[in-house]
Image (cartoon, rainbow, N blue to C red):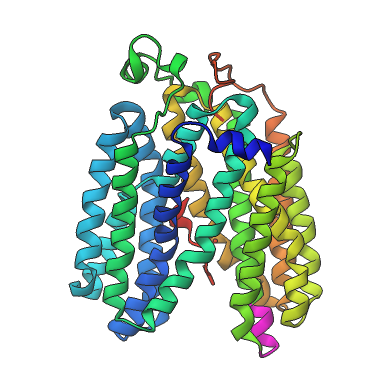
Amino acid sequence: MIEFRRVLAVPGMTPLLAVSLLARAAITADAMALTMYVVLALDMSYAAAGAVVAALTAGVALGGPLLGRMIDRRGLRTVLSATVVPQFVFWLTVPVLPYVALLGASFAAGLLMVPIQAVTRQAIAAMTTEEQRRAAFALESVTGEVSYIVGPTLVILCAAQVSPGVVAWGVGAAIVAGGAGIALLDPPLRAEDEAGAGGEAGVQAAGRPRRREWLRAPMVAVLTMGFGVAMLLSGIDLAIVATLREAGQVSWAALVVAVFGVTSVVGGLVYGALPWPMPTWLLLGLLGLVTIPAGLAHDWPWLCAAVVGAGLLTAPTLSMVSGEVSRLAPAGARGEATGLQSSAASAGFALGAPVVGTAIDASVPASGFVAAGLIGLLAALTGYLLSRRSPAAPSPPSSSGAPGRTRQVSVRNPTSR
């Protein structure tokens, strides 16, 4: 654990991760809050609620790269101001919006979602040395897993005590507080020598590379694997519910998902403390392999045991994707690169459930785990082959090391990615 203590000793790292956890817990819960509002307060169907969540997710997927590029051009506080205010207005008005207006407003809110995760990843790359970076990104993935466990659970518990509209206000308040907290911290998004004599603005003005200089085969490989792991995780969630529903034990799904999340936290901490890294494609391939046998479990105790292997590999795989994106992106395009990573994850989560659901409908619930595992294996193989096509674009040297380098029963939420 010495590596983690060194990372947390970096000035500004502990408050950054704490504020990020608050905001990400709220962002992972926003889909659940909107679902409960549409179903309970508006008395509409789950399909109607799903349309609202889909609109929010589509906005996040489209807005990630745009907001990242704006951070590269205009700086962090400008983007936070442009996103925190719309989030405040949206969540304040959710309880009074009619359904059709809520659909459009959800898309706009997704488009202008506070980019907490992308900013946190950029700041980690700027604040740490190359030796510290793997442990730092492991901690970042662990905070993400904790947010997936805490956020939706709190929303469900609170909804049983207060109205869905009040819950929506609470989620919105936490998102706004997280964005404001990051603005107050104003973490560096460039290492000192990346900013150079002209400061960060100088990098934004003169050091912004063309997209074709860095969006090459190695970066596409990592984004593909990020898309694949998101599809796999979304599919696992659905397969858990389908398996337990067939067994008449669907009420135990929350426990199984919690076991999955806790083991992911453990896996992230263990991996971050190891002295050597593993290739991203290998971690993802192993994750796919250990997911397939989970289909042999047919009741909740065995399913809890079956998801342990996949859980232990989840946070390490996610942390390696984040680390590779940060490593391959040059300083002047790091915001856009992390935005593309968030978009890839959002698209993966959106497509994973329908693809795995089709396999379940055509066969048996166990086929859901098989389909999810095969998706992971295919993404790992694709990533491996793409990464061998051409060398990564060279990045300018940095004193902090080579510069730079996100589940809904679904309980996990792609909007945090």
Q: Is residue 141 above or below residue 250?
A: above
- Let me know if residue 220 appears in the view: no
Q: Residue at x 58, y 40 (%)?
A: 137
Residue 42 appears left or right of 50? left
The secondary structure that most of the magenta stretch takes on is helix
User: Magenta span has 243?
Assistant: yes
- Residue extent of the magenta highlight: 241-248
Residue 50 appears left or right of 9? left
Query: In the image as oriented, which residue stretches furthest toward the bottom?
Result: 248
Q: Is residue 53 above or below residue 392?
A: below
Give residue 118's quadrant in the image.
Answer: top left
Q: Nearer the viewer, residue 271 or 93?
A: 271
- Let me know if residue 203 appears in the view: yes
Q: Residue at x 73, y 66 (%)?
A: 307
User: Magenta span has 126?
Assistant: no
Q: Position of residue 375 (x, y in %)?
A: 69, 56
How many numbered discs sit on the rendered protein? 0
Residue 13 appears left or right of 392? left
Give residue 70's quadrant in the image.
Answer: top left
Q: Is residue 87 above or below residue 206?
A: below
Q: Residue at x 78, y 51 (%)?
A: 286
Q: Position of residue 311 (x, y in %)?
A: 69, 59
Q: Position of residue 60 (x, y in %)?
A: 39, 52
Q: Nearer the viewer, residue 411 or 344?
A: 411
Q: Is residue 184 above or below residue 308?
A: above
